[in-house]
């Protein structure tokens, strides 16, 4: 089978959407760090709609992979083209899929192969926006406080090696230094990651790094670059070989690097751009003055319940989210978690129907065509728990409200860290802090005689739990649920919650 390629576009089946703008004339106004599946199914698709609607050809994208070469290797022979498959179930339950070939990714740079090329691209006169979808761990911050970790090996390396950085803060700050030295206009730094106040968090990290490089650079960035907060939402599972085969068969050409997602998409962005922006409203983006309430809603409702489902589901041997949420005990628990413990902590937002939001979310989780693996969501718990569950715990404790269901989700994470599920199948703990977590768990086990003592010791791990490990109401609740999970299993713990 031939590869997907610009020459193949006229021959694709009629029901496959494709670029209709003058692709050959696109300039790269956007550099995007982290061109994984999420970016290619979210911002890139919104950007594609803006190109179609406006014909403003300043807004092509150069992607940057900070680690692996796989995306570049797959997309280069395809001239940067890839397919987005949006999947859900038809009324009769059969999978339904719409295909779109996306064209605004012009090139992919692989940072470890050529860091200089990445610096020069960010410092290019055409570049106006630097987007980021690098996942939580790409920020090299302390998850509990959001502060840059100056003791991190990658950060220390990048402070000493301005020509050949390895981390996001290193690339961004050293490239901004080039822009400043060359008297080029500033850029917008646009975080599209699931972090609380992602723009403000990014700003704090970039400025902290810049201060170490040169106080004058710090002041230039502070005065001229902007860091809009944004809320991003679309469920995008990892692409599988079966996806690649099915999509290629429908296209009639081989796409080695398609992405699969749900039809639902939301993107709420603060309208603070230092050097222009595309009209992303054409693709469903909403520009607002303050995105924080939307972020909090999304991180706590969507991601908080996603992580709870992932740990409980994975430990019960339920491989996908739709199967997990079909188990009545789990569905009832997630519904009550959202309704009774998360929703009351959310800011009042005009026009928001929270019951409708919750019902739609359960429907999104039930999408049988996504096959979203619980173990994929379970990754990187140390980076995710603070904004997904622990902020909600803090708000409720401060208001004197119960935290039983939230505590069960936290206990499920600790349970998951033992590395074996209830069916006896083992799993790796994929987490940048995996070694520290394992050590902490081992020490907790060796030093403690009761579950309560173990949990007290484990939750003393400040990079994740902050001060919460010293709050008896939190420690007791988590310990009670962990004891139940260990003695009687997930379903019994859910029934008792
Ligand atoms: C998920 C998210 O993998 C995860 O941790 O919770 O990727 C989730 O699917 C998206 O944030 C939905 O917008």
Image: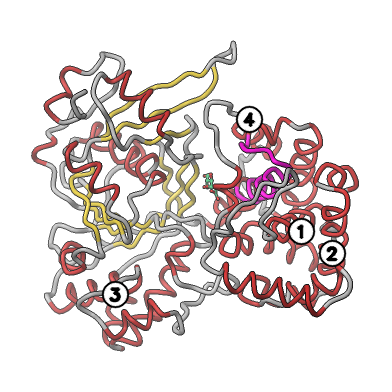
Say whether disc 1 or disc 2 marks the residue closer to the N-terminus. Answer: 1
The residue range painted magenta reads 303-321
The colour scheme applied to this rendered structure is secondary structure
Dot 2 beta carbon under 8 Å from ligand 1: no
Mark 2 nearby-residue class (10 Å; few <14, some 14–19, many ≥20): many
Of 193 and 237, the residue lying toward us: 237
Compute the Cα span from label 4 to label 3.
42 Å
Which residue is denoted by mark 4 in the rendering? 366
Q: Please report contact status of discs 2 and 3: CB closer than 8 Å, yes or no.
A: no
3 vs 1, front mark? 1
The picture quadrant where one finds residue 410 is bottom right
Count of numbered circles on the image: 4
315 magenta-colored? yes
Of 438 and 107, the residue lying toward us: 438
Residue at 51% across / 62% down in the picture? 197
Which residue is denoted by mark 1 in the rendering? 411
On screen, residue 258 versus residue 457, left or right, reads: left
Where in the figure is residue 153, as x and y percent of width and height? 41, 80
């Amino acid at each position: 089978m031939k590869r997907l390629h610009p020459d193949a576009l006229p021959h694709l089946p009629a029901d496959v959407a494709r670029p209709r703008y003058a692709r050959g004339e696109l300039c790269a106004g956007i550099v995007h760090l982290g061109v994984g599946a999420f970016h290619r199914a979210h911002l890139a698709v919104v950007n594609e709609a803006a190109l179609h609607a406006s014909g403003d050809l300043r807004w092509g994208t150069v992607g940057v992979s900070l680690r692996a070469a796989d995306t570049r290797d797959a997309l280069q022979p395809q001239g940067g083209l890839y397919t987005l498959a949006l999947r859900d179930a038809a009324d009769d339950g059969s999978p339904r899929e719409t295909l779109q070939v996306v064209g605004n990714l012009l090139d992919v740079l692989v940072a470890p192969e050529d860091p200089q090329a990445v610096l020069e691209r960010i410092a290019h006169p055409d570049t106006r926006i630097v987007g980021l979808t690098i996942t939580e761990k790409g920020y090299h911050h302390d998850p509990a406080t959001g502060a840059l970790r100056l003791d991190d090996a990658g950060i220390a390396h990048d402070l000493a090696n301005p020509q050949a950085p390895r981390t996001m803060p290193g690339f961004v700050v050293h490239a901004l230094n080039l822009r400043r030295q060359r008297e080029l206009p500033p850029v917008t730094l646009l975080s599209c990651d699931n972090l609380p106040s992602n723009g403000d968090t990014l700003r704090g990290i970039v400025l902290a790094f810049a201060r170490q490089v040169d106080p004058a650079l710090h002041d230039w960035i502070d005065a001229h670059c902007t860091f809009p907060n944004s809320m991003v939402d679309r469920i995008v599972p990892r692409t599988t070989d079966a996806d690649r085969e099915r999509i290629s068969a429908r296209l009639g050409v081989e796409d080695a690097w398609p992405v699969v997602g749900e039809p639902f998409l939301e993107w709420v962005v603060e309208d603070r751009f230092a050097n222009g922006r595309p009209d992303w409203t054409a693709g469903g983006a909403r520009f607002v003055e303050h995105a924080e309430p939307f972020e909090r809603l999304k991180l706590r409702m969507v991601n908080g319940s996603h992580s709870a489902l992932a740990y409980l589901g994975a430990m019960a041997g339920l491989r996908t989210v739709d199967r997990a949420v079909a188990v009545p005990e789990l569905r009832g628990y997630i519904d009550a978690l959202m309704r009774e413990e998360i929703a009351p902590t959310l800011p009042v937002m005009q026009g928001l129907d929270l019951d409708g939001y919750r019902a739609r979310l359960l429907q999104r989780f039930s999408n049988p065509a996504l096959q979203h693996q619980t173990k994929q969501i379970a990754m990187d718990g140390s980076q995710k728990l603070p904004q997904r569950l622990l902020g909600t715990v803090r708000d409720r404790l401060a208001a004197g409200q119960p935290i039983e269901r939230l505590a069960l989700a936290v206990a499920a994470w600790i349970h998951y860290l033992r590395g074996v599920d209830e069916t006896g199948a083992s799993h790796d703990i994929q987490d940048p802090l995996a070694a520290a977590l394992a050590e902490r768990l081992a020490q907790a086990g060796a030093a403690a005689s009761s579950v309560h003592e173990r949990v007290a010791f484990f939750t003393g791990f400040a990079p994740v739990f902050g001060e919460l490990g010293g709050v008896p109401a939190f420690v007791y609740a988590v310990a009670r649920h962990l004891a139940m999970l260990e003695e009687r299993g997930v379903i019994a713990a859910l029934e008792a919650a």
